[in-house]
């Protein structure tokens, strides 16, 4: 059974940083693109970032470009989301996702993402 387990969320002041981690129990982890999405209360789920299977390509949502980075360690079957210059509007539950395609934003719109984590709360205070 595939599991994606996120960690690293918490409460941080505006301007601060956090690093989220997601450990995946996927046998063929290096065949999957990995991504992060978020959902704030009363809002739709939003694409944050995705990274290709070998880390060679990454893509970001417009609202986080220049502030967030994504990386992965295939030996540890882990993907990271490093978030800098956090803003109150970044407050949300952050979800890890795995899918064969790096075009994960489009896959999510079609409800075709293979695996999701349970989410970790990030709260940014002003």
Image (tube, rainbow, N blue to C red):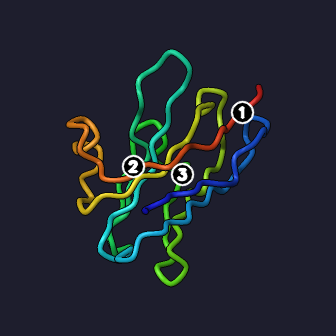
Residue 71: image x %, image y %? 49, 67
Mark 3 burial class by Cα count in 10 Å: few <14, some 14-19, many 20+: many
Residue 111: image x %, image y %? 25, 38
Task: Work out whether residue 2 or residue 82 is closer to the camera in this orientation and state it.
Answer: 2
Q: Are marks 2 and 3 in contact (CB under 8 Å)?
A: yes
Residue in view at x 57 percent, y 43 percent: 119
Return the residue found at the far front. 1
Q: Secondary structure at mark 2?
A: strand
Lower position in the chain sequence, tag 3 or tag 1:
3
Image-based side of 103 in relation to 21, left or right: left
Residue in view at x 36 percent, y 61 percent: 58
Task: Work out whether residue 5 or residue 107 is closer to the camera in this orientation and state it.
Answer: 5
In the image, which disc is placed on residue 68? 3
Residue in view at x 49 percent, y 37 percent: 38
Write down the residue under mark 2: 60
Write down the residue under mark 1: 124
Mark 2 burial class by Cα count in 10 Å: few <14, some 14-19, many 20+: many
Q: Secondary structure at mark 3?
A: strand
Image-based side of 110 in relation to 45, left or right: left
Mark 1 burial class by Cα count in 10 Å: few <14, some 14-19, many 20+: many
Is 72 rendered above or below residue 118? below
Lower position in the chain sequence, tag 2 or tag 3:
2
Count of all numbered marks drawn on residues in the image: 3
Dividing the image into 4 quarters, which one contains the N terminus? Answer: bottom left
Is 97 rendered above or below residue 90? below
**CA–CA distance in space, label 2 to label 1:** 20 Å
């Amino acid at each position: 059974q595939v599991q994606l387990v996120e960690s690293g969320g918490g409460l941080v002041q505006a301007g601060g940083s956090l690093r989220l981690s997601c450990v995946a129990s996927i046998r063929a982890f290096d065949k999957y693109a990995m991504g992060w999405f978020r959902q704030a209360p009363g809002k739709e789920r939003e694409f944050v970032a995705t990274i290709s299977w070998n880390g060679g390509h990454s893509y970001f949502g417009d609202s986080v470009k220049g502030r967030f980075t994504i990386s992965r360690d295939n030996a540890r079957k882990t993907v990271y989301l490093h978030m800098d210059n956090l803003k109150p509007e970044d407050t949300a539950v952050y979800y890890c996702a795995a899918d064969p395609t790096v075009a994960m934003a489009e896959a999510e719109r079609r409800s075709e993402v293979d695996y999701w984590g349970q989410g970790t709360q990030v709260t940014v205070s002003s």
